[in-house]
């Protein structure tokens, strides 16, 4: 490898007889310009043959040290490639030279985060989830004293330790597997940006989660729930909101947006009746729900005097009150009708899906359209076909034949 410093002057520098030293390497006849070194000298003070600055420059010693350091770094890169018996080329040495000498995993995460947040096609809720992933990985690295770990050192052993750490935090499998996929994206990003030559997690397999059996309220439970009188007014409002989630299938944020701006989303459908049509916050796919087919919705909306008068609360507030509602409800019903102690807003979506699939026996495509989904495989997260669907399906078929 040949290393060459050469002089380059801008128009302004030429007027003063000064220049900037630029750097070039040649490896096996292949040339690569490494650009400016930032070292400025008077043109007459540079000795091409010696590749040094003469003593006429009062800062000659300091500047020559900078020249020597640049040469030493290039030779170190060359020798490291030689030691590892890796391919050596001028372009590769240039990339390694221009790369920061050490990039930590968290630095790479920050760079990824900046690009991610600039992408307008990514939903805000998805961007917010990246924040929780970062909080999780930062907590892990701090606890393990690995906050300064280099990106190329974040390998399969570290990832396995992170998996075990997540389990020790009692994270649910689906949650920490999704986190791990985001964590893995950082090393992929680092390689794509040439911050590292290889992805230490390239062959790491995260695996698929075992999807737990969905939790929902069937139509009988929901009917009892709807007629139950909760003692606290806030608890009653939350119980009513849960009925809406269970009969519209919306996520928390989507229903809140409908309540705040009903004129934007509550409309008249092709059948001349009321529908709610709203692009989902997460994927912008339209959820189209014929709310007139779900009388419980009209009953709750009418109770409050219209969509815009329905109560709005933070997701965490609703989920906290739901635990109180469940405790009240379960004390007053027979054991067979009791509901899940950990009930939350997301179980409203499961209840909607189960009702449509097993009690109304609607086609999967129709359910996906109402839920703002595209893939049928995603339905199993919310509901599973069971004997109710079979029985109701036969009843519908027999009724159709009889007519």
Image (spheres, helix red, strand yellow):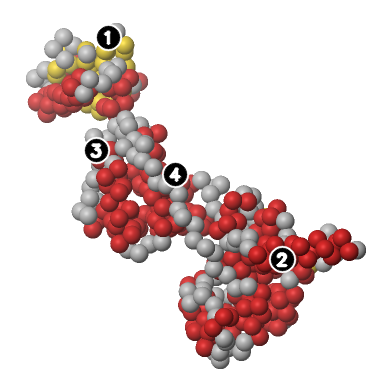
- Between disc 1 and disc 3, whose residue precedes? 1
The disc at residue 102 is 3
For residue 391, which numbered disc appears in the image? 2
Image coordinates for residue 133, horizontal then vertical, percent: 39, 55
Q: Are marks 1 and 3 in contact (CB under 8 Å)?
A: no
Residue 253: x percent and y percent?
A: 57, 65
Is 131 situated left or right of 47 in this image? Answer: right
Q: In this view of the protein, can residue 191 be seen by the observer? A: yes
State the image coordinates of residue 209 (x, y, percent, origin top left): 45, 53
Q: Marks 4/1: CA distance?
A: 37 Å
Query: How far apart are the alpha carbons under marks 4 and 3?
Result: 20 Å
Q: Quadrant of residue 58?
A: top left
Secondary structure of the residue carrying tag 2 is helix
Q: Tell me which label, 4 or 1, sits earlier in the chain.
A: 1
Alpha carbon separation for disc pair 2 and 1: 78 Å
Q: CA distance from mark 1 to mark 3?
A: 28 Å
């Amino acid at each position: 490898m040949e290393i060459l410093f050469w002089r380059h002057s801008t128009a302004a520098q030429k007027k003063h007889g000064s220049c900037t030293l630029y750097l070039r390497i040649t490896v096996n006849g292949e040339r690569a310009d490494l650009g400016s070194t930032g070292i400025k000298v008077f043109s007459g003070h540079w000795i091409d043959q010696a590749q040094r600055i003469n003593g006429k420059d009062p800062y000659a010693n300091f500047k020559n040290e900078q020249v020597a350091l640049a040469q030493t770094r290039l030779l170190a890169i060359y020798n490291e490639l030689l030691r590892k018996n890796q391919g050596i080329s001028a372009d590769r040495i240039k990339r390694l030279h221009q790369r920061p000498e050490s990039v930590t995993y968290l630095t790479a995460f920050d760079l990824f985060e900046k690009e991610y947040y600039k992408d307008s096609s990514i939903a805000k809720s998805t961007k917010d989830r990246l924040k929780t992933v970062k909080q999780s990985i930062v907590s892990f690295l701090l606890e393990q004293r690995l906050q300064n770990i280099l990106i190329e050192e974040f390998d399969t052993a570290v990832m396995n330790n992170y998996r075990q750490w997540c389990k020790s935090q009692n994270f649910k499998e689906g949650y920490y597997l999704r986190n791990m996929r985001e964590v893995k994206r950082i090393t992929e990003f680092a390689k794509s940006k040439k911050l590292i030559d290889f992805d230490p997690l390239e062959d790491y397999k995260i695996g698929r989660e075992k999807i737990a059996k969905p939790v929902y309220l069937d139509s009988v439970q929901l009917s009892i729930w709807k007629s139950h009188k909760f003692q606290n007014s806030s608890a009653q409002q939350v119980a009513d909101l849960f009925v809406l989630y269970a009969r519209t299938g919306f996520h928390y944020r989507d229903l809140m947006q409908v309540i705040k701006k009903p004129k934007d989303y509550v409309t008249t459908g092709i059948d001349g009746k009321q529908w709610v049509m709203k692009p989902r916050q997460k994927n912008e796919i339209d959820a189209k729900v014929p709310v007139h087919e779900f009388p419980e919705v009209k009953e709750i909306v009418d109770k409050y005097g219209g969509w815009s008068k329905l109560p709005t609360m933070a997701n965490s507030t609703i989920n906290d009150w739901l635990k109180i509602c469940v405790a009240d409800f379960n004390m007053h019903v027979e054991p067979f009708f009791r509901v899940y102690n950990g009930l939350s807003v997301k179980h409203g979506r499961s209840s909607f899906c189960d009702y449509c699939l097993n009690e109304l026996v609607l086609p999967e495509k129709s359910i996906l359209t109402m839920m703002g989904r595209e893939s049928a495989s995603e339905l199993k997260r919310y509901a599973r076909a069971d004997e109710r669907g079979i029985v109701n399906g036969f009843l519908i078929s027999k009724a159709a034949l009889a007519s």
